[in-house]
Image (cartoon, rainbow, N blue to C red):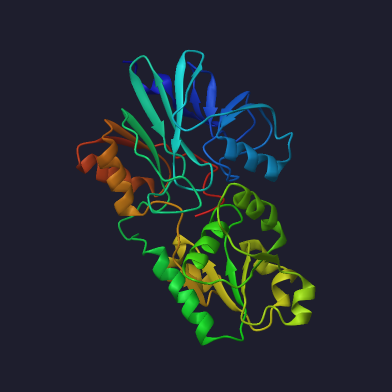
Amino acid sequence: MIKPDLLLHPTPGGLYCPLGDFYVDPVRPVDRALVTHGHSDHARSGHGHVLATRQTLDIMAIRYGEDFCSTSQSADFGETTSINGVTVRFHPAGHVLGSAQIEIEAQGTRIVVSGDYKRGADPTCASFEPVHCDVLITEATFGLPVFHHPDPRLEIQKLLSSLQQFPDRSHLIGAYALGKAQRVISLIRRGGYEKPIYIHGSMTRLCDYYTEQGVELGELRPATTEDKKSGAFKGAVVIGTPSAFNDRWARRFEDPIAIFASGWMMVRQRAKQRGVELPLVISDHCDWPELLDTIREVGPQEVWVTHGREEALVRWCELSGIKARPLHLVGYEDEGD
């Protein structure tokens, strides 16, 4: 076995594999990048060559244009790819459509880079699969014992109850355009809501792509000014990006109920700062118990924590007899939660 640091180590540009001469989720343009998923804090344009799942490559093309990199290669889940003698495999991460953990192995040492991931059920993407390894490189977005996420189906019931209680008010939901918006729509549909759902224009292409990939979202309509004139928004569900709440788009809705879907809605001060009337605690990341379950199930000799609340998770590992260290990677947690 070789030392893990010789196989993969942090650099200012991101996690770098010197044996394979590639980066994982680099924060600046590089010659060869392996990308875990399509969120902008992990997937950036300008790389020479990108290896990712087909869905992540498609999402990057939608967001950045077809020329987001010089060349690309798709990886199927479980498929083995060799890069300069280093074995690479992609495994489902359960974060958003196309998201993957990346397994990197050479000379008897196996490292798994989790990327962003969640363990909860989500019909809009492939479910997380634990992968045994020597070193687990994990995120810790919600890496504090206080974070225990509720069942998202119960959170959606709060929304459905509000729709019954306030049938004349628009229900304006803030959700990130990739992953969170589609998951919220899917949860609403599974809760029995069959009316059209109105979406911000920036979400249209991604929602269309999810539908093309077999994710059932029901009837979606653009939230346009014409709909305001017809009274279509009265008692309707409208989903927009967080940034859209601060522009003219949001002012077309009369007396809306401000809603935000995020794991951070557990923190009351965050909801208050955003002016959220109905917080929905729906996260696309692991909470504290799920992070611990993952480490126990994977059984690594070492845990490296990329970003988030690193210190608490590192301390838990040390108390559990597992070697651990924070990587303090910069440039992540900019999109999605």
Tell me which residue sits at (42%, 20%) in the image: 7
Residue 73, given in percent of the width and then of the height, sits at 61, 26
Q: Relative to 170, is 272 on the left or the right?
A: left
Q: Relative to 314, is 241 on the left or the right?
A: right
Asked whether 125 or 28 is in front, the reply is 125
Residue 270, given in percent of the width and then of the height, sits at 49, 67
Tell me which residue sits at (20%, 41%) in the image: 320
Asked whether 272 or 105 is in front, the reply is 105
Please tell me in which quadrant of the rendered image residue 238 appears. Answer: bottom right
Residue 263, given in percent of the width and then of the height, sits at 44, 60
| Quadrant in which the N terminus is drawn | top left
Tell me which residue sits at (58%, 40%) in the image: 55
Please tell me in which quadrant of the rendered image residue 274 appears. Answer: bottom right
Query: Exactly how many numbered labels are in the figure?
Result: 0
Rendered position, 4 above or below 289: above
Q: Relative to 321, is 219 on the left or the right?
A: right
Rendered position, 184 above or below 178: below
Rendered position, 261 above or below 317: below
Asked whether 234 or 258 is in front, the reply is 234
Residue 307, given in percent of the width and then of the height, sits at 44, 44
